[in-house]
Image: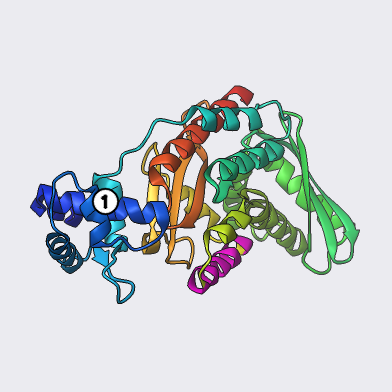
Amino acid sequence: MNDSARIMEQMNDRSREVFRRVVEGYLSTGDPVGSRTLTRAMSEKVSAATIRNVMQDLEYLGLLDSPHVSAGRVPTQQGLRMFVDGLLEVRDLDAQDRERIDATVDGSDADIGVLMDKVGAALSGATQVASLVLAPKHEAAIRHVEFVQLAPDRALVVLVFADGQVENRVFTPPPGQTPSSMREAANFLNALAGGRTVGELRQAIEREIATRRQEIDTLARDLVESGMAIWENEGESTERLIVRGRANLLEAGTQAADLERIRTLFDDLERKRDIAEFLELTDEGEGVRIFIGSENKLFSLSGSSLVVSPYMNADRKIVGAVGVIGPTRLNYGRIVPIVDYTAQLVGRMISDRS
């Protein structure tokens, strides 16, 4: 039994109700909730003094905090965690939210990037915070690889996939490349590429270079390594994580401290940090997960919450994730079903395409 469950068991019905109403009031308004407000809302008639005593006990347990000199309380990070785990009532998806997402994401786009961009726009529009969509890697097998010299400091790596899709990216090649080293690098890759995905090819390259290092020209080897690095890592960070709705965060934060936190979050999103870890957050199984404050290791913003869910392909393999990020004062009961529905919708569209 974790600490939250243990504390919840120790609380009586009155303490639970006071705690729940403080958290719900804070999530609704963003303001501290005072004892006089609660006397009008409680299911049993109790005095403001009694409620103040209960709130002090909850503060002692680390569940509530007093942000100002006033008697109002707000939930702590621990309190929010306990509320989400034990008291949160997740609503059914609102019909209007469902229609809005369905209308925006109709699945007719041939380009997966355009589709995922629409998913992000629909998600941020429905939740009114920033959305994060991790697009799937291209899982088709590679048919052909080519390097093209554009200038002394610019080259193109081109991948032709078995499903007919062609992708290319510009990168800075190691110095001293020649037409001969480019041909050797392409021949080396094409000998390994047959039937492999990008990720599988990367592993095969590492094995082959380790065992045949003396046989492969140094220039060609460097070109292979830098070309595939731009494909799998740098390209991934600029292409796979789609962020939409940042302006919603500015509307949500009005105080100076809020705006400073939002600026920090913007910086993190601009750098699109730790994308692989974003997907790893979801690898403990299906369903929506909620990360509150410092539980969210992806971003340096401690005053944020991340609500995220994976989506799967036709083989039931997790290939991406969708989620929203915003202040800890999120309407979790409404947002959780929206994220869950969007993840399932994306999973079905990805499966249909394959």
Chief secondary structure of the magenta portion: helix
Where, quadrant-wise, is the C terminus in this rendering? top right
In the image: residue 155, left or right of residue 33: right
What residue is rendered at 90% in x and 57% in y? 150
Q: Is residue 82 in view from this perspective?
A: no
> In the picture, residue 52 is in which quadrant?
bottom left
What residue is rendered at 72% in x and 62% in y? 222
Which residue in the rendered view is the most extreme toward the bottom? Answer: 69
Q: Is residue 190 above or below residue 254?
A: above
Q: 112 or 331: which is nearer to us? A: 331
In the image: residue 332, left or right of residue 222: left
Give the extent of the magenta segment. 256-270
Q: Is residue 74 in view from this perspective?
A: yes
Q: Is residue 8 above or below residue 174?
A: above
Q: Position of residue 243 (x, y in %)?
A: 62, 51
Label 1's element?
Answer: helix
Residue under circle 1?
Answer: 21
Which residue in the rendered view is the most extreme toward the top? Answer: 352
Q: Position of residue 1 (x, y in %)?
A: 14, 50
> In the picture, residue 220 is in which quadrant?
bottom right
Q: 161 or 202: which is nearer to us? A: 161
